[in-house]
Amino acid sequence: MEHEQQHEQYQELVKQISPKTPHAKRLILAFVVGGLICALGEGIAQVCIAFGVSQQHKRIIVPCALIFLAAVLTAFGVFDKIGKHAGAGTSVPITGFANAIIAPAMEHYHEGLVLGVGANMFRLAGPVLAFGTAVCSLYGIIYFFFLR
Amino acid sequence: MAKRIARSVIEFSKAPAILGQAAVAGKIEAEGPLAGKFSEVFMDERLGQPTWEQAETALQAAAIMHAMAAANCSADDIDLHIGGDLINQCTATGFALRDENIPFAGVYAACASFALALALAANLIESGGMQHVSCCGSSHFCAAEKQFRYPLELGVQPTPTAQRTATAAGAIVLSSASDKPKPRITRAIFGNVIDMGVTDPSEMGAAMAPAAWDTLRRFFQDTNTQPSDYDLILTGDLSQIGTHLLHELARQQAGLDLALVHRDCGLMLYDLIAQDVGTGGSGLGCSAAVLCAEVLPRMLSGELKRVLFIGTGALLSAVSPLQGESIPAVAHGVLIEMT
């Protein structure tokens, strides 16, 4: 009991002393950068339309272009510097997904193509795929029985 | 002979001498307040090696080589090398010695490993069993990020409490044979494992401050001394938050003011305002490099006479916080006196 009380008191002290996360600043930056990425995606879509690309192809080209851009920026060591400030602004759009795959792939390159790159590239993106698939399946069941 | 003062507090009457020391560092460390004080600086983060792990090995090898040169001895003179690093299974340390013919003992107490190595080495020399023992500790920012946090290129935001793992190494050659005035290890203390229930791995300073205080408190009590008896009390890598907490613990529990004599290596290695290093430096290389590059030369110049060096280590692994474990910490110390 006395131990727990000491721990609680100490953790209270830690909380008082530790700097707080600058939420307002981070939210605004994430909003602005995330918005710019979306605007860029929309820009690419407009270019596609101008060149007479079909609606279906446009839906593939836009995410592919953003993924490619994020992958290149990751490979050249630029993405992490932007992400450090932009936070959710770069990690929530599809750019974050690309970054989460390329970064561990680069990190583990020297442990071999199979057990290094292959085994590690989905280390961070894997949970998104796993839970994304799970949620989609759940929604599919709900749709099938109630919304169809 | 070594004398037991109290439980795990030892006094060395022959006092092993620090024959030579050296510190090597990476680019950011070399641009900080200790610029120009390192034996060698590596502007290339990889040190010309293909992997971060090999880069840290090269860092260690360089520090050991420079320390032996400073001590004016060769690999054949070293009876034992005691060292550690933060990479799994201490590979940076072991690999650094594979081309040398030096008996090797790896130690691990996280970032307190260098202080632990010094305390063990002093015991071995004092016992008469060994003449020259070298010690080394290192850390590499990229190798540590890869092992403990995220891939380097991942665009994540650091928490406001985060510290920067130093890319640096420090090495010391301890000897029984020196009549010249040298910094000498006169006392050592081994620390308890202290856990105050801190669970966030980005709050290392907060996890380690209670361990540092426990070791300090016992040392003051058992040796019947107080902070003002020392020219400098040097902790390893508590950085901003941990330093604040240590001062607070000392004030609350013993009514002591540590602010006058205490400095932390994590705050000495970097310029927190000009450099993007969060709340300060951390890592095994941080305390090893600051001790070897800054503090020991200041002792040799006569500016400091009595330095109590306390290494602080957070004993977590990459998986332990995920399994819901809190972060225990340990602090080992040596008293270094100029005689």
Image (cartoon, grey):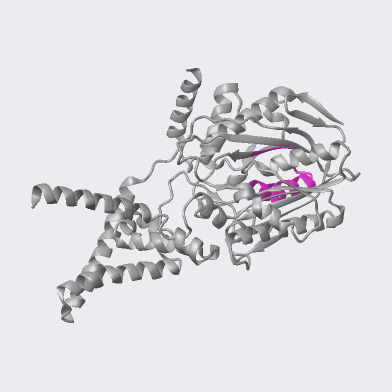
The C terminus of chain B appears in which quarter of the rendering? top right
Question: Outermost residue, bottom direction?
Answer: A51
- For the magenta stretch, what is the residue range? B287-311
Residue B67 in picture, x, y percent from top left: 77, 55
Residue B289 in picture, x, y percent from top left: 67, 51
Residue A143 in picture, x, y percent from top left: 13, 51
Is B288 contained in the magenta span?
yes
| Drawn side of residue B7 relative to residue B323, left or right | right
Residue at figure coordinates x 46%, y 33% from the top left: A14
The N terminus of chain B appears in which quarter of the rendering? top right
Quarter residue A42 falls in: bottom left
| Drawn side of residue B286 relative to residue A73, left or right | right
Is B163 contained in the magenta span?
no
Front-lying residue, B273 or A94: A94
Front-lying residue, B197 or B101: B101
Is residue B301 visible in this depiction of the protein? no
| Drawn side of residue B254 relative to residue B232, left or right | left
Residue at figure coordinates x 65%, y 26% from the top left: B217
Residue at figure coordinates x 52%, y 55% from the top left: B146
